[in-house]
Amino acid sequence: GENVEQHPSTLSVQEGDSAVIKCTYSDSASNYFPWYKQELGKRPQLIIDIRSNVGEKKDQRIAVTLNKTAKHFSLHITETQPEDSAVYFCAASGGATNKLIFGTGTLLAVQP
Amino acid sequence: NAGVTQTPKFQVLKTGQSMTLQCAQDMNHEYMSWYRQDPGMGLRLIHYSVGAGITDQGEVPNGYNVSRSTTEDFPLRLLSAAPSQTSVYFCASSGRTGAYEQYFGPGTRLTVT
């Protein structure tokens, strides 16, 4: 079955810097790659997603890139702000079942 | 719309007790799933359903049962609670499959002593 690995587990940046979180997946049939943000004590919420027919997608300060050959995808946050502090999860879905498998999460701390 | 609702919000069980975590959605979503969240382990898929009458196992199904008799409801049953099942449980739904935006419920924090 699908396995998603996520790095780093924790990331600390200064306000205004960029943050990059990387994920790899194992199932070459996966074709949908979302990123979720979870603030402390709250439920995960989708922030951006990408499908396998696209190499990059951007939404204001966040962007996701996908390398299907290498089976990895990354989340890029530019001009980080304290409100970006949260846990970020990558995930992958596809194949025969289309079930969604998550990575282990990255705790991002933006220092003011 | 209420979205995805879960009850209870908090629960304490003794080892060996059974209980059902409730999940309901009012968005007419076909796909529903249960995840457990543990520190450092991310969100792990327990069971999922692609429609009424259809369920399947996820990554960590042992010790849990599900059923899907209606489109709206997807309860998760703990047959004989164990301390290893102490976790936060999230229910999620989406319009079609896992390959679309998941809408999460608020979660149930379960402690097994």
Image (cartoon, coloured by chain):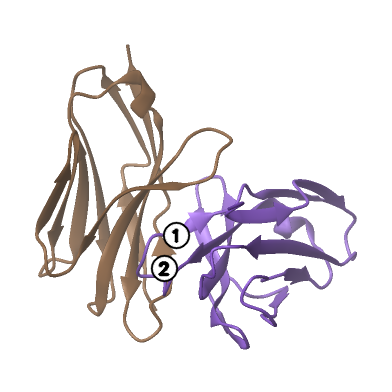
Chain colours: A brown, B purple
Q: Residue at x 11, y 63 (%)?
A: A54
Q: Which mark is residue A100?
A: 2
Q: Are marks 2 and 1 in contact (CB under 8 Å)?
A: yes
The residue at 41%/74% (across/down) is: B97
The answer to whether residue A60 is above or below residue B56 is above
> Foreground: A84 or B43?
A84
Q: Taking A53 as reference, is B34 left or right?
A: right
Secondary element at image label 1 = loop
Query: Dot 1 surroundings within 10 Å: few (below 14), some, or many (20 or more)?
Result: many
Give the x, y percent position of residue B85.
72, 59
Residue located beneath label 1 in the image: B102
Q: Is residue B39 above or below residue A69?
A: above
- Residue B34 percent coordinates (x, y): 59, 65
Relative to residue A17, is residue A98 depicted above or below?
A: below
Residue drawn where x is 82% and y is 73% of the image: B79
User: Please, what secondary structure does the residue beneath circle 2 have?
Assistant: strand
- In percent of width and height, residue B15 lies at 88, 60
Residue B113 visible (yes or no): no
| Kind of residue at disc 2 | Leu
> What residue sits 52% from the left and 64% below the top?
B93
Can you tell which quarter of the image residue A18 is in? top left
Closest to the observer, A94 or A28: A94
